[in-house]
Image (cartoon, rainbow, N blue to C red):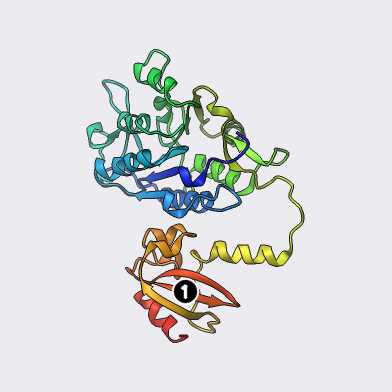
Amino acid sequence: MSRVPDPALSRVVLIGTAHYDFLPALASVEDNLLSLADVLTAEEVWGLPADHVTIVADPVTGADLLDPVVRAADEATDTLVFYYAGHGLTDPRRGELHLALKGSDAQRPYTAVSYAHVRDALLDSRATRRIVILDCCHSGRALGTMSDPVTAAIDEAGTEGTYVLAATAENQKALAPVGEPHTAFTAELLRIFQDGIQGRGPLLDLDTIYTHVRAAMRAKGRPLPQKRDRNTAGRLTLVRNRAHAKPARDVRDLERESRARLDEHRHRPATAMKSRLVEVHDFDPRYHAGGPLAVQGKCSWHGRTCDEEVVASVRVRDRGKDTWHAVCERALRTLRTTL
């Protein structure tokens, strides 16, 4: 494929469980979700509209996890990406992979969601390409075997195939290094999305991404990812290569892009404020097509540190550039002083 998947016809579902009632917490999972959403909506990487990326953090019920997958499967006709990070549990009788919820218990696998349910939803999609990325223990169990009838159905699904990328082999644990902002596997995936791969062309296909992630994990002595692909899925382009040589650009253009990319994640203090409030509306995600924080109803003025309820959508002018922000009551009070 000589282009990235059509952003208008593609959907991404990012699901992660960071906090648990009975299992160890995985604090870096939350940053996995936000960072992936951020990079996949960047125009220079894929350029997905923010409302085509669904984030589900700490699902409590099976419906919390599965309903967004079913919705995205119904909507996608080009490419459908499902990503899960968290604890992976196994059924001792059948050896099947289960994806942990907030209240899941390792001694009761039925308290987690069977990966088979996710697989069924993907098979029902009209999308011609289905990409599954699992960053959890025992994720290699999702790869199936050639004699598995469900896997055989996947083999025949879609005109260009299905690609499953698992962080570990079926009997290995995934790694979430203490003190690192992301889990080990997702960190390498993000590095490729954000920085690209030197010496490659303008587009990166799935097999190239997999090969470089595997090499990086091997070099660090970490669990090796696994993959399974059907038909020509491995040759499918997923993202643009940010390391590919480009014509020199005006430094002012780069500065403007950098500011735009940070607008939803950087706190702007009330002191010495240069920004001016231009327009105020009731909160509406449609005003925030450029940023995943606001679409989730998070206060993009204060960034990830703010847990207050979003009350308004505002247009702010800073050095001649207008940006939409979702804001909490505290941020709105501060900004009103500049109206």
Seen at 49% across and 60% down, the residue is: 290
- In the displayed structure, does residue 282 sit left or right of residue 182? left
Q: Is residue 311 above or below residue 133?
A: below
Residue sitting at the far top: 147
Query: How would you rate the neighbour count of disc 1 (Cα within 10 Å): few for under 14, some for 14-19, many for 20 or more?
Result: some
- Viewer-proximal residue among 259 and 84: 259
Residue sitting at the far right: 248
Q: Position of residue 204 (x, y in %)?
A: 62, 38
Q: In the rendered picture of this protein, how many numbered marks are placed on residues?
A: 1
Residue 218 in which image quadrant: top right
- In the displayed structure, does residue 165 sit left or right of residue 257? left
- Viewer-proximal residue among 239 and 208: 239
- Viewer-proximal residue among 309 and 19: 309
Looking at the rendering, in which quadrant would you find the N terminus?
top right
Q: Is residue 23 above or below residue 145?
A: below
Q: Position of residue 258 (x, y in %)?
A: 61, 63
- Residue bearing the label numbered 1: 315
- In the displayed structure, does residue 291 sit left or right of residue 147? right
Q: Is residue 252 above or below residue 191?
A: below
Asked which secondary structure carries label 1, the reply is strand
Q: What kind of residue is marked 1?
A: Arg
Residue 15 in which image quadrant: top left
Seen at 43% across and 43% down, the residue is: 11
Seen at 50% across and 46% down, the residue is: 7
Q: Position of residue 83 (x, y in %)?
A: 42, 40
Q: Position of residue 319 (x, y in %)?
A: 60, 78
Looking at the rendering, in which quadrant would you find the C terminus?
bottom left
Seen at 45% across and 69% down, the residue is: 325
